[in-house]
Amino acid sequence: MTEWVSLIRDVPDYPKPGVLFKDITPLLADHGAFVQVVDELGSGLTFDKVVGIEARGFILAAPVAYRAGAGFVPVRKKGKLPAQTLAANYDLEYGSATVEVHTDAFVPGERVLIVDDVLATGGTANATVELVRRSGAHVVAVSVLMELSFLSGRDRLPGLEVRSLVVV
């Protein structure tokens, strides 16, 4: 396993009792580790745009796009984008949420890499895939820093290449 994995810190009982939070901020603060992660998230793929899912996905997706010479597209929580948007709903443990993207974010046929920090239940990633496809673009892969395999999020992304740098 890659050396930088040791920089992911476990924080017990955050954000609520019984949850073991995987904190990536020490990894992000280490230049060498950050460069390795950015390089690995997009390696071997060809894409025109990189989608970052709010909020930590932005931190990883923007440098992946820069490194690859691709555009960056933010997918945000409902009501956070200033122009006309497409919206997709997804379920949470207690309720539902909505993500949005600008209607002009993609040109039909563009190849899109979706990047996020964590793949948990797959709801947000699946909603993001829906937004990209409704725009006429093609998802080449979903690439995440960390996958929480016990939540089976990958099962909500059938037929897609799902890349996880770390699986817990």
Image (cartoon, helix red, strand yellow):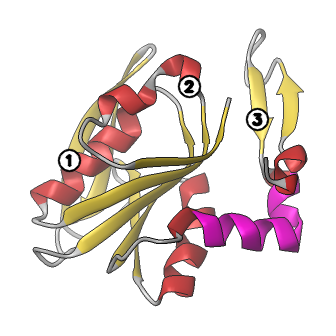
Mark 3 and mark 1 in contact? Answer it, CB < 8 Å: no
Measured along the vertical axis of the image, is residue 117 above or below residue 114? Answer: above
Measured along the vertical axis of the image, is residue 102 above or below residue 92? Answer: below
For the residues labelled 2 and 3, the Cα–Cα distance comes to: 13 Å
Q: How many discs mark residues in the rendered view?
A: 3
Label 1 vs label 2, nearer the camera? 2
The residue depicted at 63 percent of the width and 72 percent of the height is: 39
The type of residue carrying mark 2 is Ser
- Residue 77 in the image, given as x and y percentages of width and height: 40, 48
User: Is residue 27 located in the magenta-colored stretch of the structure?
Assistant: yes
Look at mark 3 in the image and give the residue it sits on: 22
Q: Check disc 3: other Cα within 10 Å, few if <14, some if 14-19, many if 20+.
A: some
Tell me the number on the disc at residue 149.
2
Q: Is residue 117 left or right of residue 53?
A: right
Q: Check disc 1: other Cα within 10 Å, few if <14, some if 14-19, many if 20+.
A: some
The residue depicted at 31 percent of the width and 68 percent of the height is: 112
**Relative depth, front residue between 158 and 49:** 158
Q: Residue lying furthest bottom in this view?
A: 69
- Please tell me in which quadrant of the rendered image residue 122 appears: top left
User: Is residue 124 located in the magenta-colored stretch of the structure?
Assistant: no
Measured along the vertical axis of the image, is residue 19 above or below residue 142? Answer: above
